[in-house]
Image (cartoon, rainbow, N blue to C red):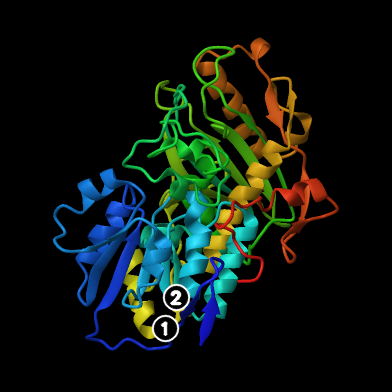
Amino acid sequence: MKATMATGFAMAVPSSVFGANDDIRVAVVGINGRGGAHINAYRSMKGVRLAALCDVSQKAFDRRAKDLGKIEKYVDVRKLLDNKNIDVVSIATPNHWHSLMTIWACQAGKDVYVEKPCSHNVFEGRKCVEAARKYNRIVQHGTQSRTDKKRVRRVAAARSGKYGKLLVAKGYCCKPRWSIGYKPIKSPPSSLNFNLWLGPAPEQPYHENLVPYNWHWFNDFGNGDIGNQGVHEMDLARWGIKGATLPRSIVSLGGRWVNGPGFRDQGETANQIVSVFDYGDSLLLFETRGLVGKHKDFPRIVDYEFYCEDGVIRGDKFYPRGKDKGEELVDADYHIYPGGIFGNFIDCVRSRRYQELNADILEGHYSSAVCHLGNISYVMGTQNKFEKPKDFSDNKIVGDSVMTLLENTKAIGVNPADTTLCVGPKLAFNPETEKFIDNPAADRLLTRPYRAPFIVPENV
């Protein structure tokens, strides 16, 4: 069987099934940050061999590969994919590369572990799903909370109906994300292949706020913290809504603020944003606040909770309506395949049963896409007075989240008279077609222009 990749070359797609004693040969792509966890996981597994590393930074190789002995090293992922001895590609690159590498790897006959979010935009995520199914590849998404029994038990309790109808599933991503300042334009270091780092993103000059981490806060590469840390909590909150895929409508508000009135840093994505997603009988509410941890009233919180007719599921307890004392959660049916996120992935690589993945690419696509949809409403927003809009007052839980955002922002010294709030439009969405309803301007933000030859294909 042959598959033609977007780069124009053909690669064979193997159909072999691994035996119990066969080594699975893994290549990790992107070895900074989270890539270290990938390396350590595979090194510790029986029947798995860490065969290759790929990164565009020589500094990353100097740091990660020094104690790995003789291991193949690649700068260009396309050359890695030519290697027929690699069975699995494990991707921990910046977000803007996730989908294209996943698609290319599927076309090349490799199974894939891809970090969250699996996509930089909604279009890309759907293409990942199509590629996984077309080429019969095992593709696991890096939302590892789906392998955590305590977290999944909370989701199962919300889905069970034993506390009445689920009214609001709420996620929090409130980690300290303060100013990144400004870095001047300069030549990329000789140790970095900046052209390959850019990949599908537009050509642009280099500055040190891009590599290795702050790319998260630039629209061409990252998705803000809602699509960074937040996709984990978004995934669990969405999972709590029975049958939830993509919402019927989306609306967001927020902004990017740092210490002091009128001051802005180099980052582009919102560091304070509230997003509301309509799932019919239930709302999904997401609160992303990065100006936390320096004021006692606004601590770090990364979590999710469920507001039901009879009370609130928070942490490992249920709090009946009107009571401060929590109760043990009811027993509810759930199943997790063993091995953790990486072990479960390798088990499915051997069995060839994607249905047994704890975080299959389809679920990863949905949760990533919800984050992207929240960002789309925000970037289409207009500047308004720094106050709670009337449209956000109908639901008390939503209204309280908006007020928390406003009070949090004021607490760092921002004067409401000197700033504005970006309020996005409420966008109607069709979950089946994965398009907005009668809104071509919003539809354009479901994808992006790609820089040749790094093009995410329409037909995978």
Q: Position of residue 151 (x, y in %)?
A: 41, 57
Image quadrant assignment for residue 134: bottom right
3D distance between C-alphas at marks 1 and 2: 7 Å
Q: Vertical placement of 173 versus 365: above or below?
A: above
For the residue marked with disc 1, what is the amino acid?
Arg
Q: Which residue is mark 1?
A: 352
**Residue 312 in sight here:** no
The part of the image, by quadrant, that contains residue 77 is bottom left
**Image location of residue 322, percent across then percent down:** 56, 41
Q: Residue at x 56, y 63 (%)?
A: 159
Residue located at (50% from left, 81% from top)? 136
Left or right, 131 with respect to 340, comes to: right
Q: Residues within 10 Å of mark 2 (few under 14, many from 20)?
A: many
Using the rendered image of the protein, determine whether residue 298 is visible from the camera's viewpoint: yes
Q: Quick check: 337 above or below 94?
A: below
The local crowd at label 1, few if under 14, some if 14 to 19, many if 20 or more residues have their Cα within 10 Å, is some
- In the rendered structure, find residue 138 and report the number of the disc placed on it: 2
Q: Dividing the image into 4 quarters, which one contains the C terminus?
A: bottom right
Q: Position of residue 178 (x, y in %)?
A: 45, 26
Pointers 1 and 2 in contact (CB under 8 A)?
yes
